[in-house]
Image (cartoon, rainbow, N blue to C red):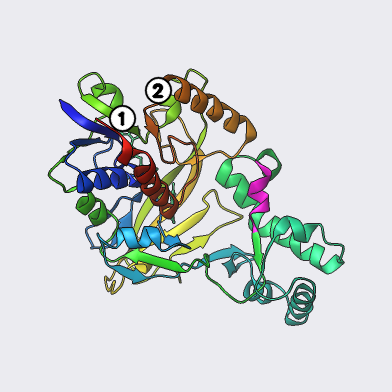
Amino acid sequence: MKCDFLIVGAGFAGSVIAERIASESNFSVIVIDKRLHIGGNAFDFRDENGILIHKYGPHFFHSVSNKPVDYLSQFTEWIPYQHKTLGLVDGKLIPIPFNFNSLYEVFPFKYAKLLENKLLTKFGFGLKIPILKLQEDEDEDIKFLSDYIYKNVFLNYTQKQWGYSPNELDPSVTARIPVLLSRDNRYFQDKYQVLPKDGYTPIFERMLNKKNIKLLLNTSFKDVKEEIDYSHLIYTGAIDEFFDFRFGHLPYRSLKFEFQKHNLKQFQPNSVVNYPNNNDFTRITEFKHLMLNQEQKSTTIAIEFPEKYVDMINERFYPIPQLANTEIYNQYFQFAQENVPSTIFIGRLAEYKYYNMNEVISVALMIYENKIKKLKI
Ligand SMILES: Cc1cc2nc3c(=O)[nH]c(=O)nc-3n(C[C@H](O)[C@H](O)[C@H](O)COP(=O)(O)OP(=O)(O)OC[C@H]3O[C@@H](n4cnc5c(N)ncnc54)[C@H](O)[C@@H]3O)c2cc1C
């Protein structure tokens, strides 16, 4: 088999680049994916009740920039969707991230009012304050509040999510936990918050349905790399695997999803409920909330159990934010630059980086414009 571009991985990184090359040139492109489907982790499908299931966990599209939205709008219509998460804390479902509404849910009115006034006087309305900043505050009440949030919302959740306590992780993980000084219950404040009307998979079908793209599923790079004669390689798989783990394994956190069907119209009040304490799982997603007009009599949920990633057993999901891992990745990066400078490594596995969908789309569009478009065959 022969092609101008071999692209490993049919997730957003690989599919955006494939689509751009195929739409703007006559170059031949082969896209391979070791899974049985396209879409990478954004893959979704309808179950027997017609409910759209996100196989690898709920995917909410959000972006501050219009660019990834404009790009994807060629392939889908959108429905507006402002994501909200609730968390079970002290037996109550409260808005997450913690905001003034959460404050009034967990504390008696008078004390909540006092805390609200203190926070407003000190920081002003509408800001996102990192929990670490609140913990450093000298005011006893603000300190009490930050300790409460840290213990009840953050600590156990982080331990479950990563398998490490917060002080074993990169400090940026703790630094990112915000307290929202407003009554805005939305999880994201980005200007663009939407979901594709028919789901994500049709987007990928439309992107890859081009005469000069050949798609091979159930095909792993190592099994075909000697058989395909290509001029350029774009690789979105794991970089440590590409180099046969010569600098060691890059660790990942994996997830197990337990899907359940319930003969109820609704299982929980919104799409995602977090369980920071008490249980082994971190969150439950009810998919019905992610689509319009879901009138089915039953509902499907996914219970999410974080677990250690083990090669060949489960999936790589989140790069683990620890300095030692960044150092391993840097060795691979350096080695790649020196030994295979013409191979393009892009995406969450190839760059060992947590990317949101909007981010990986933007990076893929940029790499296409700045690098790939200029390549000669
Ligand atoms: C649980 C979870 C929830 C998320 N929620 C959100 C969200 O709400 N909003 C958001 O914006 N983002 C979310 N994301 C992030 C989103 O999934 C990523 O941004 C996106 O998947 C990155 O695309 P990618 O192409 O880099 O990687 P992937 O989607 O993982 O695609 C890589 C593809 O390469 C294939 N591959 C790997 N190695 C090989 C090989 N050797 N041979 C052949 N094929 C190979 C894989 O099978 C895979 O299909 C979430 C991620 C997870 C894990």
Q: In the image, 140: left or right of 264?
A: right
- Whether residue 46 is visible here, answered yes or no, is no
- Whether residue 371 is visible here, answered yes or no, is yes
- Expressed as whole percent of the image width and height from the top left, the position of residue 264 reads 34, 69
Q: Earlier in the sequence, mark 2 or mark 1?
A: 1
The residue located at (33%, 70%) in the rendering is 79
Is disc 2 in contact with disc 1, using a CB cutoff of under 8 Å? yes
Quadrant hosting residue 33: top left
Q: Main secondary structure of the magenta part?
A: helix
Q: In the image, 348: left or right of 29?
A: right
In the image, residue 157 sits, relative to residue 124, either above or below, namely: above
- Expressed as whole percent of the image width and height from the top left, the position of residue 113 reads 75, 80
The residue located at (74%, 55%) in the rendering is 132
Given residues 68 and 348, the one toward you in this image is: 68
Quadrant assignment for the C terminus: top left
Quadrant hosting residue 263: bottom left
Identify the residue under disc 2: 340
In the image, residue 324 sits, relative to residue 155, either above or below, namely: above
The picture quadrant for ligand 1 comes to top left
The local crowd at label 2, few if under 14, some if 14 to 19, many if 20 or more residues have their Cα within 10 Å, is few
The residue located at (40%, 70%) in the rendering is 81
Q: In the image, 299: left or right of 186?
A: left
Given residues 352 and 17, the one toward you in this image is: 17
